[in-house]
Amino acid sequence: MSSYLTEFTRRVLRRGLEALPASERAVVERFIEREHVSRDTTRQFEDDRTLGQRVADRVARFGGSWTFIALFAGVLVAWVVLNSVVLARREAAFDPYPYILLNLFLSMIAAIQAPIIMMSQNRQAARDRLEAAHDYEVNLKAELEILSLHEKLDQLRDAQWRELVAMQQEQIRLLTQLLEARDLPRDRPVHE
């Protein structure tokens, strides 16, 4: 079966296994060996992460959530109320209006958060490329399987046609013999 599939892939792909790119060669080899190609790319991607990548993913996940927005809004409102209302009455506000210290902290948070989120987005793009490559492999193998099934069906149909033609020729031969046998008694006298 393996040699049949090897020859089949050579005919379908119109080139030898050696001429294929490595990813396609791996798919074709799995097709020939009747192994599956699908795998959990999410698990593979998650298992390969470093500590920094895991932290970046968590920061990006939290920084893009409604929880973060609500907490951040709460901190900002508390900062403004504390410095403008509570501490301003005592003249002990550590960051009076226009909140220069708050602006400094916000700038520092943005300066740190932006590259972390970009790292996470780069990882997401890499994950998307991995999934796209995996989808291509699965689609290629499925296409090879479908083409193989079509070829097998064509072979079965051709074999059935040959068998049907042979049966028909045999029936014609038998009918011809019957007709010849029926014509022979006419030459003999009817009543002896």
Image (tube, rainbow, N blue to C red):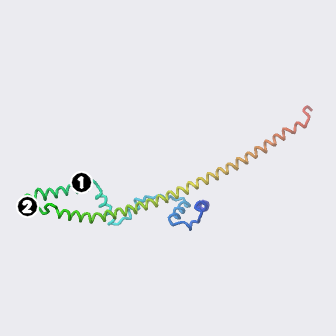
Q: Residue at x 78, y 43 (%)?
A: 174
The extreme top residue here reads: 191
Per the model, the C-alpha gap separating discs 2 and 1 is 29 Å
Residue 122 quadrant: bottom left
Residue 183 or residue 12, whichever sits in front: 12
Q: Amino acid at mark 2?
A: Glu
Residue 121 coordinates in the image, percent (x, y):
35, 62
Side of 8 where 184 appears, left or right? right
Q: Residue at 7% across / 61% down in the picture?
A: 91
- Residue of label 1: 70
Residue lying furthest left: 90
User: The C terminus lies in which quarter of the figure?
Assistant: top right
Question: Quick check: 168 above or below 8?
Answer: above
What secondary structure is marked by label 1?
A: helix
Q: Local crowd at mark 2 within 10 Å, few (<14), some, or many (≥20)?
A: few
Q: Nearer the viewer, mark 2 or mark 1?
A: 2
Q: Position of residue 69 (x, y in %)?
A: 25, 55
Q: Residue shown at 88%/36% (left/top)?
A: 186
Q: Which residue is mark 2?
A: 91
**Residue 153 at x, y = what percent?**
61, 51
